[in-house]
Image: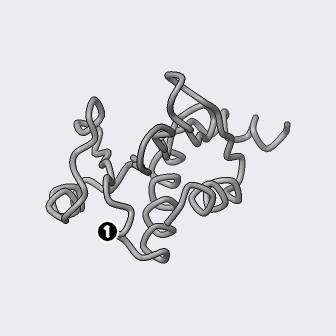
Amino acid sequence: MDIETIRNICKRLPFATEGIKWENDLCFMIAEKMFCVCVLDGPLKVSFKVKDEEFDEICNLPGIIPAPYSARHKWVLVEKPSAFTNKQWEHYIIQSYNLVKAKISKKKLEQLGNK
């Protein structure tokens, strides 16, 4: 897995945007809410949200830890990109997108569709 593949997965999701935050992280968002974050300096590290019931199991996989500062919101940090297959990466990124999108108001989502 590489950053361009992750970027391609994220960018094809409806209303997904990208931006740099904290001078160092490539963030993918829907309605300004992050669903995937890639660290730009050093080896590839990626954070995303997972289902509450999956959090402990995923954090026990080699190369994956609770995401600093956001683990309480069930975000994980993948420090070893080979921890997942490409198909699993796509699944978890899309799932994260859907989990974040589900928390956005209907009104805000309608506004996105009218832009």
Residue at horizontal 69 percent and vertical 53 percent from the top: 11
Occupied quadrant, residue 69: top left
Side of 108 relative to 64 (left or right): right
The correct choice, above or below, for 37 with respect to 86 in the image is above
Side of 30 relative to 92 (left or right): right
What crowding class fits label 1: few (fewer than 14 Cα within 10 Å), some (14-19), or many (20 or more)? some
**Quadrant of the image containing the C terminus:** top right
Q: Amino acid at mark 1?
A: Ala
Q: Which residue is labeled 1 in the image?
A: 83
SS at mark 1?
Answer: helix
Residue at horizontal 49 percent and vertical 66 percent from the top: 1
The correct choice, above or below, for 7 with respect to 57 in the image is above
Side of 62 relative to 1 (left or right): left
Residue 48, percent across and down?
A: 41, 49
Occupied quadrant, residue 81: bottom left
The correct choice, above or below, for 38 with respect to 72 in the image is below
Report the residue that reaches farthest toward the right. Answer: 115
Residue at horizontal 73 percent and vertical 40 percent from the top: 110
